[in-house]
Amino acid sequence: MRMSKKSSKFARKFVQRPMSVKIEHINKSFGKQQVLRDVNLEIPEGQVLGLLGPNGAGKSTLMKILLGLWKADGGTVQVPQRIGYLPENNPLYDEMYVSEYLQFMAGLTLNGAATKREALNGEAINSLIDRVGLTPEKHKHIRELSKGYRQRVGLAQALLGDPQLLILDEPTTGLDPNQLVEIRSLIRSLGQDRTVILSTHIMQEVREMCDRVVILDHGEIKADKMINNIKDLEQLFIDSTHGRI
């Protein structure tokens, strides 16, 4: 694919701990449609940030740029080298056992011999399974698991290699009320020792899991606030997406 002249001005940098995610002057267009407009954002280590916005706001595009799947048309992105990702549709190999699948994915996706050897260690896999609450299910085929446990498998896969940044795209879609409570608690705990970006269109998710919210609309950041400083998130969302801020 031929890149535009603006693409050559985009830079994606890797940094080591302690660090923050830093996004400066990011723009992205598809043809004549501009999806991101001069996005600037910094996220400190250990913060759970909720990326909130209506459909088409640019949330998925921004995440794909952070992941290195797409290039922006200009600007700079600073991210850690180790990034974990849970996509919205969470593809899994249903015929594999939970522990077998995680060992397979560790060997397939991780770079660096030392990291791979550590991740393939049976004790390390078991520790990860225990952390996401999968121990009772680890000897089952993935096809036998409920939606909630399948999400836990996806989270465990995203945590392979101990990522410094965890990006979650609609991680609670389709869960029942009990599963919602458990997954929200798990995600909140994961944010204690890493940066988490949580993309969602559900405001309750942001209130219950996040330290901070960024509201995107038409590719622009319309609001950026700490959750503790927001009296009415619903009203903030309405005002932000209707040009009242």
Image (cartoon, rainbow, N blue to C red):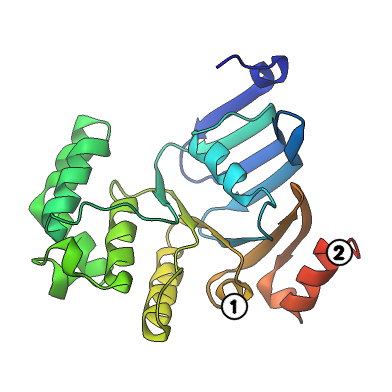
**Circle 2: is it few (<14), some (14-19), or many (20+) Cα within 10 Å?**
few
Above or below, 30 against 177 in this view is above
Q: Earlier in the sequence, mark 1 or mark 2?
A: 1
Residue 34 point in image, percent of width and height: 75, 37
Q: Amino acid at mark 1?
A: Gln
* 190 left or right, relative to 108: right
Q: What residue is shown with label 1?
A: 204
Give the structural element (helix, strand or loop) at label 2: loop
On the rendered image, what quadrant is the N terminus found in? top right
Give the structural element (helix, strand or loop) at label 1: helix
* Mark 1 to mark 2 CA distance (whole Å): 20 Å
Which quarter of the figure has residue 139? Answer: bottom left
Residue 209 point in image, percent of width and height: 53, 72
Q: Amino acid at mark 2?
A: His
Q: Foreground: 31 or 222? A: 31
* 180 left or right, relative to 159: right
**Circle 1: is it few (<14), some (14-19), or many (20+) Cα within 10 Å?**
few
CB under 8 Å between discs 1 and 2 = no
Which residue is depicted at the point 23% across and 60% down? 128
Q: What residue is shown with label 2?
A: 242
